[in-house]
Image: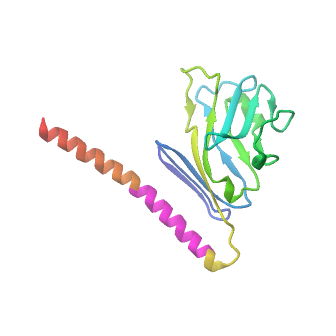
Amino acid sequence: MCCSVFKHNDLNMIHSSGRGTIVVVSEGNYIILPCSLSSQESLVRTRFDWKKDDEREVFVYDAGLHHNNRRSGQDEHFRGRVSHLSDQLKFGNASIIIRNTKVADSGDYTCDFPFHQPDRETVGESFISAIILRSYSNLKQLRVSTFSYIVLIVSFVCGILSAVVLIAVSVCFLYFTV
């Protein structure tokens, strides 16, 4: 799967590939980290965990208890800035929103269903890399930021093209050596 979503005013960008999803947003905005079950079964009475860099607890939902209503253990850095889409739980959606993004929010996030049966699949990616860019006060810095976006996009495209070329070369090699 490969898709990109761009939003010019808030400088939001989403890139998704077979390895995971990369979400880019500017500092001070909000970011939605997507995660849901392919079965679309209700998550109201289940548990899902969001972690950053495999250790920092970002958000835990456990059958109605979560960090915004009596559940403890959330990393101090995320306290008061993370919520889930409560009206979407009944559709299997475990996505979260991080508000007032900070550069320190950049990192790798995982969505996990610890009591999840193996025959159920997660839609999209459960591994997400978030990149939070500093807000810029002058146009010259903004042009550099725009250039950085272009470089990022080109590197994604080149990475995908490199993988396609590598596969094609491997297939040709196998074909001609057999």
Magenta residue check for 145: yes
- Does residue 53 sit above or below 43 in this rendering? below
Question: Splitting the image into 4 quarters, where does residue 59 fall?
Answer: top right
**How many numbered markers are drawn?**
0
Residue at 80 percent across and 46 percent down: it is 79
Image location (x, y in percent) of residue 155: 44, 59
Image location (x, y in percent) of residue 89: 73, 31
Whether residue 94 is visible to the viewer of this picture, yes or no, is no
Q: Residue furthest right?
A: 70
Magenta-colored segment: predominant secondary structure: helix
Magenta residue check for 55: no
Residue at 55 percent across and 38 percent down: it is 124
Magenta part of the protein: which range?
Answer: 142-158
Image location (x, y in percent) of residue 143: 58, 75
Residue at 26 percent across and 46 percent down: it is 168
- In what quadrant of the picture does the C terminus appear? top left
- Does residue 41 sit above or below 161 in this rendering? above
Image side of residue 8 versus residue 170, left or right: right
